Image: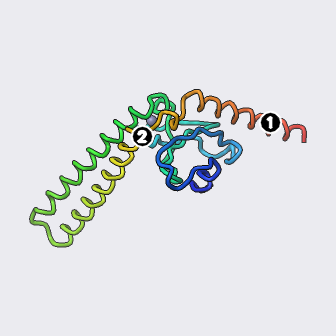
Amino acid sequence: MGSDTLAIRFGIRVGDGLQTRSWAHHADSSLHSDPSFYCVLCGTKSEMAFAWTTLFNGQEALGDLCAACVGAGPAAAAEHEGRKAEEWREQAKQWREQVKEKWPKKDKELWREMADWSDKKAQRHAEVAQGLHTLDPARWSTLAELFAAQEQGIKAFWAEAMEELEG
Ligand SMILES: [Zn+2]
């Protein structure tokens, strides 16, 4: 399912800014699909068999959150994103230093491209951090919402399994 379709399903509009939504995904994905993913905030490999909490920026789904990051809330997430922006800025700086070295022209070109790319990554994380800093807590899913979605997913799973048994 495309991320814009997912956003539309939740009634999320283009200019809506940052928010998370918890949702039971069993109805939309095959049971056999891999339930593991890397948390968009902390990068930890996580598993969610029946429900996900997805971070949106407008209609764009940025990725899914692990339960720890959902529970930690938007202020912790903002801190995390701010740190990532800092890391990418630092990386860009290091690559820009390389551009000044006596490398062949095409190597310099490559360092410059990598530095620009890192700057873009830094910019993106800084924007997310900024959005999270000012986020209304009502726009951030609680663990209770995630667990409710999970319960809903488990119920949908069993309902389908029973139907298969009876049919
Ligand atoms: Zn996480």
Quadrant in which the C terminus appears: top right
- For this orientation, the residue located farthest to the right is 167
Relative side of 138 to 105, left or right: right
Q: Quadrant of residue 74?
A: top left
Relative side of 42 to 162, left or right: left
Q: Quadrant of ligand 1?
A: top left
Which type of secondary structure does the marked residue at label 1 adopt?
Answer: helix
Relative side of 1 to 73, left or right: right
- For this orientation, the residue located farthest to the left is 102
Q: Residues within 10 Å of mark 2 (few under 14, many from 20)?
A: many
| Residue 28 x %, y % | 68, 48
Q: How is the image coloured?
A: rainbow
Q: Which residue is mark 2?
A: 41
Residue at 59% from the left image edge and 27% from the top image edge: 144
Cα separation between marks 2 and 1: 33 Å
Q: Is residue 119 above or below residue 24?
A: below
Q: Nearer the viewer, residue 95 or 62?
A: 62
- For this orientation, the residue located farthest to the bottom is 105
Which type of secondary structure does the marked residue at label 2 adopt?
Answer: loop
Of mark 2 and mark 1, the one earlier in the sequence is 2
What amino acid does circle 2 point to? Leu
| Residue 93 x %, y % | 19, 53
Quadrant in which the N terminus appears: bottom right
What amino acid does circle 1 point to? Ala
| Residue 151 x %, y % | 68, 30
Residue at 24% from the left image edge and 59% from the top image edge: 115
Q: Nearer the viewer, residue 94 or 142?
A: 142
What number is the disc on residue 45? none
Q: Nearer the viewer, residue 30 or 73?
A: 73
Q: Is mark 2 within 8 Å of ligand 1?
A: yes
Q: Which residue is mark 1?
A: 159
Relative side of 70 to 8, left or right: left
